[in-house]
Image: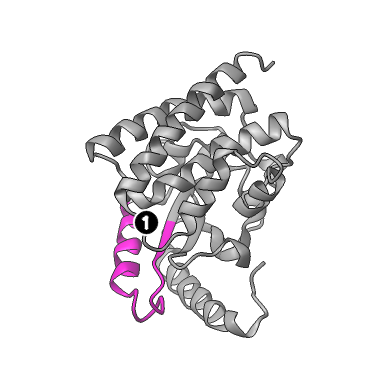
Amino acid sequence: MWPFTSKEDREINKTVQQINNFIVSELKNKGLISLYLAGTILWKKERTHNSDIDFFGIVSEKFKHEFESKVNNKLAAKQKTLCNGYESRFRAFPLSVLKGEKEAEWGTVKFMRPERILQRFPFFKLIWGKNFNFKKDFLKPMSLKQEARYLIPLFKKSIIDLRTGKERFPYTDFPKHIFELVRIEAMKEHNLKYTPERQKLVNHLKKEKNHIIHEAMRLRNKKDLSRKEVLVFANKVELYVKEFEKKIKKWK
């Protein structure tokens, strides 16, 4: 967990602090309440050749959606200097939405749902601002069955979009998306405790040698992943999702 202590991580520590200072200077008077370091950069075994540096911010009603876009545009423009070559993004989460007082109207929290996002926050690192108690201050997470039913239609649509070339994200991101559905399966049927770390999920299912998770990890880590490989993998994901739908009908 950050701050990282090994010699090779000193560059990341420096970069994280630089970006943190930049985001706070840009947003502390515009409604930023707390800033968290998030994503795979936190765990050395999770990082790949294209790992980025993600920041999640809890914001007040004063914060406007365009503030997020402006900061991200500046981070992109300063990728070679401020960010030392790392791709970096800031995502804002309104406090009122995380508390369940209002419906999400924009941003990542609308797409991912606060009841899902809040499972991740305790694993992130507070680097500026107010410290919240996630169990007491915010919404309760979805049940595993509710989360599965929420995700399955998204997977079906992402497969269609991938095949037609209309995907919202780079096709190289597709293999890592399946980890979310596999995590639900592993928690419900293989006694996994919640974790955002993909490697822990893979390790938990290592005895399930033919499980789709192992190919997903291999493709996620591959440097020269082709679109053809992703499309072949999408066919396997489609079969996995169909079987998953049958499983959740039996869940209480």
Residue type at mark 1 is: Leu
**Residue 134 in sight:** yes
Q: Secondary structure at mark 1?
A: loop
Rendered residue at 63%/54% (across/down): 199
The magenta region covers 66-90
Q: Is residue 219 magenta?
A: no
* Frontmost residue, 41 versus 38: 41
**Residue 141 in sight:** no
- The image position of residue 29, as x and y in percent, is 44, 63
Rendered residue at 42%/25% (across/down): 153
Disc 1 marks which residue? 225
* Frontmost residue, 236 versus 76: 236
* Frontmost residue, 251 versus 129: 251
- In-image side of 41 versus 91 (left or right): right
Rendered residue at 36%/47% (across/down): 229
* Frontmost residue, 48 versus 117: 48
- In-image side of 35 versus 205 (left or right): left
